[in-house]
Amino acid sequence: MSLRAAVINLRCGADITANLAHAEKYIRAAHNNGAKFIVTPENTYLMQGNSKNLFATIKSEKETAGIAYFSALARELGIDLLIGSMAIKVAPNKAANRSYLFGPDGKLKARYDKIHMFDVTISETETWKESANYQAGNTPVLTHVDGFNIGMSICYDLRFANLYKFYAQAGAHILTIPSAFTAITGEAHWRTLLRARAIENSAYVLAAAQGGVHDSGRKTWGQSMIVDPWGAVIAELDNDEPGFCCADLSMDFLDTTRARIPAWQQNTHMPKK
């Protein structure tokens, strides 16, 4: 059993209409390359630089235009389409950073709210406090695409290995990690962390990313990639420009890899002092 998958680099901004068209362009291109499962980055719908304007811009899930837009696109193309995330208003002053998986019939198959908030101090001049505007999720989500089980996550979740161990032990074959890594942390950690999550769990990793300098001045790393269960990068964009890359995922290869080194299914037993 195999599945052709694609991950997309985008460079989204504050213009939602432009972001939708930007994403559609590369989704269609990946589909034309044979992809049946396509993943876009975190913040596909809106990459808002000024958090003061966030709650004047975003809406409830029912009112968010991207839901119907990407549902119709998935149905037209007959693909499984994972939109890395959209900002959804869940309270007057709180949003959810939410991934959506639409099936080939356009129906919503799964949604996942980012669990780990990006509250960090990267340098003296760059700090982020995602929890100021976003409400953390608390539920891992396991879904499926063409016989492959999918463990959903978003960006900063990547640093929390236990989430992915949970997914692997729950039956996940693919880990989706749509992201908007900063340029600094991306250069230092992106590739290493993605390969580690794949190796630890003998799973495919699909990591779509925002890249480049956005209209707010924010800089993201890009470098979308697909990693196989042995830790080999089997498709990647080696830059921060918009684009896509594809790879064929093999269940036989995954099963063989897991049989060779079954660490993904073993629990840690610490020695007693």
Image (tube, helix red, strand yellow):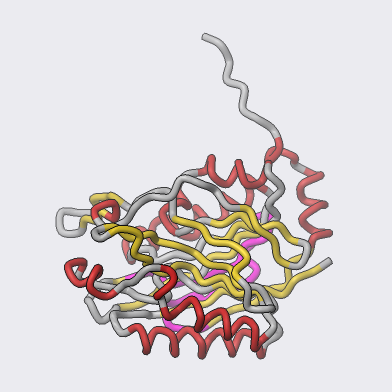
- Among the 4 quarters of the image, the one containing residue 76: bottom right
Total marks shown come to 0
Q: Is residue 123 visible?
A: yes
In percent of width and height, residue 31 lies at 65, 86
- At horizontal 66% and vertical 87% (from top left) the residue drawn is 77
Check the image and report above or below for 145 versus 28: above
- At horizontal 38% and vertical 80% (from top left) the residue drawn is 11
Check the image and report above or below for 193 versus 97: above
Locate residue 160 relative to residue 95 in the image: left or right. right
Which residue range is magenta in the image?
220-243
Which residue is nearer to you in this view: 20 or 26?
A: 20
In percent of width and height, residue 17 lies at 37, 88
- At horizontal 25% and vertical 81% (from top left) the residue drawn is 215
- At horizontal 44% and vertical 55% (from top left) the residue drawn is 114
Locate residue 82 relative to residue 2 in the image: left or right. left
Q: Is residue 230 visible?
A: no
Check the image and report above or below for 9 versus 73: above
In percent of width and height, residue 44 lies at 42, 75
Q: Residue 228: within the magenta?
A: yes
Q: Residue 215: within the magenta?
A: no
Quarter of the image with the N terminus in it: bottom right
In percent of width and height, residue 122 lies at 25, 53
